[in-house]
Amino acid sequence: MNDDSLMYTENFTESGFVFTPFNVDEKAILFPSEKATFLEEVLLLNDFNFDKNESLVDEDSKENHIKIVEKAIDEINKSDLQKVVISRKESVQLSDFELLLVYQKLLKKYQNAFVYVWFHPNVGLWLGATPETLLQISDANFKTMSLAGTQVANKDSESTFTEQINVVWKSKELEEQQLVTDFIEKQLATISSNLKIDKTETIRAGNLLHLRTKVEGKLLEKADLKSLIRALHPTPAVCGLPRNMARDFIIKNENYNRSFYTGFLGELNLKKSNGAIQSSQLYVNLRCMEINHNKASIYVGGGITKDSIPKNEWKETVSKSETMKKVL
Ligand SMILES: C=C(O[C@@H]1C=C(C(=O)O)C=C[C@H]1O)C(=O)O
């Protein structure tokens, strides 16, 4: 594109690249295909030095996060709320920020993730490496996943193996992830056929491990892409259960605007080379940051259930932000 006008998708029938906020009431930005140029380049990745920047704990932020988590657990115990994802934004002062280098480091560190840089002069600069697919759809055949539960990987190796064996998960994480799988299955029941739910596996994203269950199916003719997207987004992996109750809790209690964090992004209705089949590849915007002048804002969160321990939930967000800080 060679002008700075902003365009939006009305109903996900357009073709291009979308960037959507967490809040479904806000507009989804579209870079339309007809105004885009596709460039393909092979990037050779060096062996980078991933600095261990031991950062100081921001005590105010810690206290604030723990308070909101405690409030969420209270709410879960006294109402129908089952799960809610609580997040925060952490600022890091930057010196010598080199976009291409940071992008290459993200590619190297997150070999199983969708790694992106997104920029618009009127919106800003975003970078991320997300392990979570919202939706891949080609013709009517779609794939999605339930991803939740977090633990720090034992070894800090740069392993590219997606499947990790001999990892033990606690019931809190197993239940938390099962809630997401059940939600996806229920949401898809009336709009899809041939639903197949895989066995749950452990995957690695940077230094973290998550539980993942792959789901696939066929979209019924009576349904369209918009209804499929609305059925899935936001899943309890980034919002909670029941969805509206969790969303209201988040908007009322998180003391900041998530903006594009936990929204989704990716290719929308692109035609394959033969032109006959349209496909979309959409990813949940996790492990992401926004760069503004000399500051990086890193967005991190985690799922809260009745079994959550507030201090551990804080630590989980610290682990998530540390893996992002390693590339800065
Ligand atoms: C909300 C985030 O991640 C989500 C929450 C997870 C959890 O609660 O364990 C794990 C993966 C994601 O589904 C994040 O990374 O900010």
Image (cartoon, grey):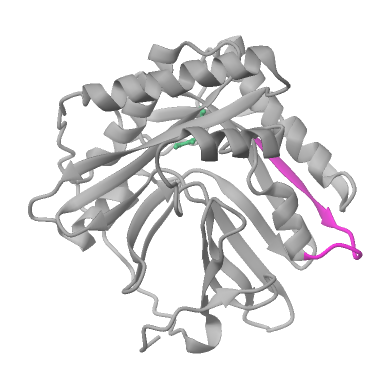
Relative to residue 312, is residue 63 drawn left or right?
left
**Looking at the image, can residue 221 be seen?**
yes
Residue 282 placed where, x, y %?
58, 58
Relative to residue 88, is residue 283 drawn left or right?
right
Farthest left residue in view: 95
Farthest front residue in view: 252
Q: How many marks?
A: 0
Q: What is the quadrant of residue 15 in the picture?
A: bottom right
Give the residue drawn at x 33%, y 68%: 42
Residue 125 placed where, x, y %?
31, 63
Name the residue nearer the viewer: 170 or 28: 28
Q: Is residue 190 placed above or below 31 in the rendered structure?
A: above
Give the residue drawn at x 23%, y 45%: 327
Magenta residue span? 213-224
Give the residue drawn at x 69%, y 37%: 243
Q: What is the quadrant of residue 66 in the picture?
A: top left
Give the residue drawn at x 75%, y 35%: 183
Q: Is residue 80 placed above or below 224 in the rendered structure?
A: above
Q: Quadrant of the N terminus?
A: bottom left
Residue 165 placed where, x, y %?
52, 21
Name the residue nearer the viewer: 180 or 140: 180
Q: Check residue 110 for magenta coloring.
A: no
Q: What is the quadrant of residue 287 in the picture?
A: top left
Residue 136 placed where, x, y %?
65, 57
Q: Is residue 7 placed above or below 96 in the rendered structure?
A: below
Relative to residue 24, is residue 203 drawn left or right?
left
**Looking at the image, can residue 204 be seen?**
no
